[in-house]
Image: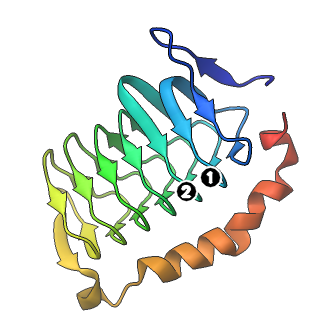
Amino acid sequence: MPDRRYYSFEGVEPEIHADADVSRESTFVGDVTVAADASVWPGVVLRGDIGPVNIGRQSHVGDNAVVHASTVGDRVMVGHGAVINEATVEDGSLVGFNSTVNTGVTVGERSVVAAGAVIPEQYDIPAESFVRGVPARVTPLADERISAEEIFSTYSSGEYGTLVDRHEELFDE
């Protein structure tokens, strides 16, 4: 795999499913698993040293995001420049550009974390929530008239989903 930055840590190697699309310009360290149909874009760092990193099926991790010792569920979109540190983002959620999900946080299923939001340590975000601000405030998605599923469908299965195919050189082996 030319130009990829895969590093073992204490004898543990990253595991990338054959059907995942991983940029040659991303970095994987240690106990990292990327599931089928996921995409990992340029500049992403997935660091599984103090704990594992799991990227779920059909999830997308955008340019320059950092995921450290965390779990990203299935059908999750992680925006450009987001930081997820020792946290869990459950299925169907979106983590906006340049947002921060701190240690011990759980983002509940089908939630939306707005761009630039900072979630303090040890927060549990209920399912179907909208999270915004610094520090983050949480409101039910229903109150905001936002659908995480609609957003995911628009970007994942639409133009964004086919973008990998159009970037042959970023993802070739």
Q: Which one is earlier in the sequence, the residue at label 1 or at label 2? A: 1
Kind of residue sitting beneath label 2: Ser
Is the N terminus in the top left, top right, bottom left or bottom right quadrant? top right
Dividing the picture into quarters, in which one does residue 59 lie? bottom right
The residue that label 1 is drawn on is 38
- At horizontal 70% and vertical 65% (from top left) the residue drawn is 161
* Farthest residue, direction top: 10
The residue labelled by disc 2 is: 59
Mark 1–mark 2 distance (CA, rounded to whole Å): 5 Å
Residue at the image point whose x is 16% and y is 49% from the top: 120
Q: Position of residue 66 (x, y in %)?
A: 45, 38
Q: Are marks 1 and 2 in contact (CB under 8 Å)?
A: yes
Residue drawn where x is 41% and y is 83% of the image? 147
Coloration of the structure image: rainbow
In the picture, which quadrant includes the C terminus? Answer: top right
What x and y, as percent, mark residue 84? 35, 43
For residue 104, which numbered disc appears in the image? none
Type of the residue with mark 1: Ala
SS state under label 2:
loop
Q: Is residue 143 above or below residue 36?
A: below
Residue 148 % position (x, y): 43, 77
Residue occupying the point 54% across, 14% down? 8
Left or right: 2 with respect to 152? Answer: right
SS at mark 1 in the image: loop
